Image: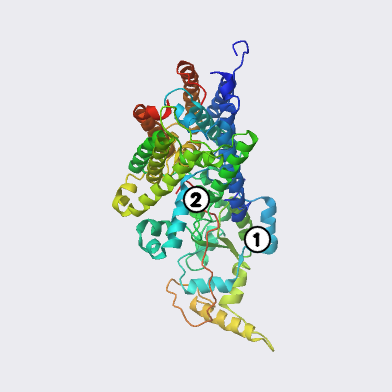
Amino acid sequence: MSEHKKRSYMNPYLAGVLLGVVVLAANFISGRSVGSSGAVKSAIVAGVETIAPSHAENALFYKEYLSGHKGNPLNSWLVYEMLGVIIGGFLSGVISRRLTWKVEHSPKIKSRTRLIFALAGGILFGIGSQFGRGCTSGSALSGMAVLSLGGFISMISIFGTAFIFAYFFRKLWI
Amino acid sequence: MGPLVVNEIISDNTNLLLAFFIGIAFGFVLEQGGFSSSRKLAGVFYGYDTVVLKVFFTGAVTAALGLLFFSLFGWIDLSFVYVNETFLHSAILGGVIMGVGFIMGGYCPGTSFCGAAIGKIDAMVFIVGLFIGVFLFAEGYPLYEKLYKAGYMGSPRISEFFGITEGLFTLLMIIAAVLMFWGAEWAEKKFPREEY
Amino acid sequence: MKNISFTPRMLLTAGLLTLGVIIAAVPKNTTKPYKLSAKQILDELKSGTQYIEPEQVAQMLVEKDPFLQLIDTRPQNEFEKFSLPGAINVPFDAILSDEQAELFDQNVRTFVLYGNGTTQANEAWMLLRQLGYNNINVLRGGLNYWAEAILNPNPPAGITSNDDLARYNFRKGAGQALGGGEQPAGNDVKPTGGQKAPVQPPKGKKKKVAGGCS
């Protein structure tokens, strides 16, 4: 571990403890924990409701969502939290001078390839997070903090699968 | 005392405002930890950078420990803290799909927002993908509604599942995490990568 | 790094393991913390929100409101002599027993505590509220006032407002329906006339926690 390349990031263990404190604070204040994919879901429901109201009334997915949630889908805990994440990430980038327009990839591939895989990965993650009822933050991290069985199942299947498939996608990263 | 919103110490609107501040802290910590970089995130699967593993597991055990101590001191009533529901089949299926998405996209949803916030274009494309993915799921939902709701197990805690106390399970989790950190630092020395 | 004795990982390991051993060794905290502070109880007592009017209870009885549950806090022998229809006997000294905890620990039914007066019912109310149970009410005036107001209402004297007259009529109707006068109430209660007072549906106060990513 050479020191110079990691200098600009916080020590991972310290960052981990702080992350734990954030999760703890969320549980203490709101009785729930952080999540991300739920905000995307709220945005999709709100978008479909605005653009195609009749479709939102008839399609099962939106019907189930709207019957379980009152008011505007965007007026939800997760949406406010994710707005905060964007601002928090930005502030951190400003402080540590990491604001750059950049496509990050292995030197062996082109930016275009990276972006195609990023899009595909995003689509898969979007679908998977709905099946999993939450993503790495909402299901795995938050679930593990409250010792939820589902959280551990999510964590093991996400990281386990990624490890198994890592070999096939190694050119993207190393 | 806690959770504050359940015991009506704060109102619903204050709760939403605080969600915003919790989000800021969450995003800040993720970015400071290096979660805004996809190559750093993917590094854990090749052993050249295990920051994800360290931050993620340290965070999980710290929060779990904190909740148990808060409960011990009577500061929080754990029976009012949300425990994720477990739907066995769709949890595993979802996890597998997310795992493939993770290694292809290099981000997970939380970190992609974080990366996008500091100008990572791949993160923004990933977010576009997320929206498409959720929309596709929503449109095809009737096809797999049965699967989505199969294997319902309630909201069990893993300690109940193994029949041990929460404290003991947390200790085991800490030991596992510490061993992983040790292995991770060993792997970082074994598979070093140049600056990226 | 080699010369420095503690790396961050070692510090973290030491800290987490210590706390982990402590949390594994101590028994889980099972004491139910008091849900309301003494001050909150005082505020509720001062504003008298715990009281429910006899008219409202009579109305609910006449309508056979399925959510109403009358709780008689008097000793068993007194309960056997006379009780309100549908009431169950939970003597004051048994109010904290485990069976009662199961009875009260819910958000659906409206409980109405009563004794001869209100002292004992109020004491029971304070205990139950401190334990965090919701929808606990005290019958205003207890049985003494009930007998006076519902079972043997006196016609208002002299010049009275329409409100007083309406209340009297309602009480008379309800009193008859509930076996007024001398008879303990039977099970076969038929609704008669009487002014309809709107009955508030019981509502749960404790919020369900939402969470996860869905």
Between residue A70 and residue B107, name the one nearer to us: B107
| Number of numbered callouts drawn | 2
Q: Residue furthest top?
A: C3
Q: Position of residue C169 (x, y in %)?
A: 57, 84
* Dots 2, 1 in contact, CB < 8 A: no
Residue at 50 percent of width and 44 percent of height: A35
Vertical arrangement, residue C20 with respect to residue C40, above or below: above
- Label 2 resides on the chain identified as C
Vertical arrangement, residue A85 with respect to residue C14, above or below: below
Looking at the rendered structure, the kind of residue marked 1 is: Thr
The residue mark sitting in front, 2 or 1, is 2
Between residue A103 and residue C193, name the one nearer to us: A103
Q: Residues within 10 Å of mark 2 (few under 14, many from 20)?
A: some
Q: Residues within 10 Å of mark 1 (few under 14, many from 20)?
A: some
Residue at 56 percent of width and 31 percent of height: B33
Between residue C205 and residue A138, name the one nearer to us: A138
Which secondary structure lies at badge 2? loop
- State how far apart marks 2 and 1 are (Cα): 39 Å
* Numbered label attached to residue C210: 2
Q: Position of residue C159 (x, y in %)?
A: 69, 89
Q: Position of residue B1 (x, y in %)?
A: 62, 45
Q: Residue furthest bottom?
A: C159
Q: How is the image coloured?
A: rainbow
Residue linked to disc 1: C119
Residue at 50 percent of width and 47 percent of height: C98
